[in-house]
Amino acid sequence: MGLFHYLLTVTAHSSSLLRVAMDAKTSSLPSSGDSRKVFACVSMKEEKPFDFLRTVFEGVIAGGTAGVVVETALYPIDTIKTRLQAVRGGGQIVLKGLYAGLGGNIAGVLPASALFVGVYEPTKQKLLRTFPESLSALAHFTAGAIGGIAASLIRVPTEVVKQRMQTGQFASAPDAVRLIATKEGFKGLYAGYGSFLLRDLPFDAIQFCIYEQLRIGYKLAAKRELNDPENAIIGAFAGALTGAITTPLDVIKTRLMVQGSANQYKGIIDCVQTIVREEGAPALLKGIGPRVLWIGIGGSIFFGVLESTKRLLAERRPSTRKDPKQE
């Protein structure tokens, strides 16, 4: 509770800094004109024509790159977290084969991360141009949720196969897909889909909202663009805080995904009730340490690589003359 209280205190302080910086910035700008143009000066330097296809393309490349780097670097921690959550009672955690399922998982993480950012970036930019400045957080939150819904179509089968392999049920990803589809049908690849959305939609929305809002506040206070280490630190904080908050949802998702055809749990509510009845409420926080560590470090790497890749892609854009009508 001490750590959680500390994180909330830091978040509140960051929000206050953001409001102060926003007020200072706004007071230094002309009072006339469209408020969205004022916001564009804060977050995007200047209003530019919205190139949907280029935004999608750059988001796909940046998201795919960041996703693969994070998954490869932190897969063993994720495996330990999964085994901690899946074990019942006083069972022992096996520390062998911590990279089990990595190859198959990357095959899913690459398109899922690419699809998420490819949807998130244009949605975010469109919403920021539509919503008033005061609702920028809602724009980031909504874009994160929409990106999560799109990516879930790939993420869920990937997660099911990965976690079944991490818990030793299958030796390879192709075997896992084939046997799951044979024994449980196509729906077996989407086991725990509802609980996955219950965890990942708020996770994506909260994490990206915290990250984007802190970046805006920091840029206003520093009066310059952020460098890669600064983006990484903000990403680590956003990831760790969001990971801690959503741990119970992650435990429920893991139990439903790894149960296979045993059907120990009849659904999300039954899963919660069974865990609390048989193992106690603290079991809903199983794996919180590895999860916060994994997502905190992962957030640092992901957002650091994401922003770096986006910047490199932006530098390769062909220079275009601005249309005065669009300023």
Image (tube, rainbow, N blue to C red):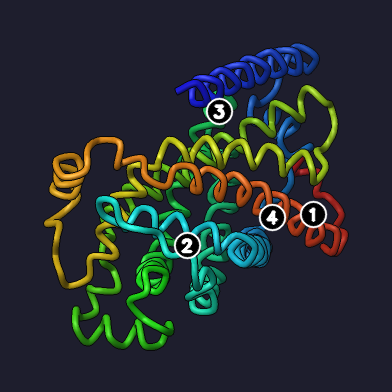
Q: In the image, which disc is placed on residue 306?
A: 4
Q: Nearer the viewer, mark 4 or mark 3?
A: 4
- Front residue (pair 266, 144): 266
Pointer 1 or 3: first along the chain: 3
User: Residue at left 59%, top 27%?
Assistant: 133
Per the image, the residue denoted by label 2 is 79
> Could you tell me the amino acid type at mark 3?
Pro
User: Residue at left 55%, top 63%?
Assistant: 76
Pointer 4 or 3: first along the chain: 3
Quarter of the image containing the N terminus?
top left
> Could you tell me the amino acid type at mark 1?
Arg
**Which element is circle 3 on?**
loop
Per the image, the residue denoted by label 3 is 132
> Could you tell me the amino acid type at mark 2?
Thr
Q: CA distance from mark 4 to mark 3?
A: 26 Å
Question: Where does the image place residue 57, in percent across and percent down from the top left?
Answer: 65, 66
Per the image, the residue denoted by label 1 is 311
Q: CA distance from mark 3 to mark 2?
A: 42 Å
**Which element is circle 1 on?**
helix
Q: Nearer the viewer, mark 1 or mark 2?
A: 2
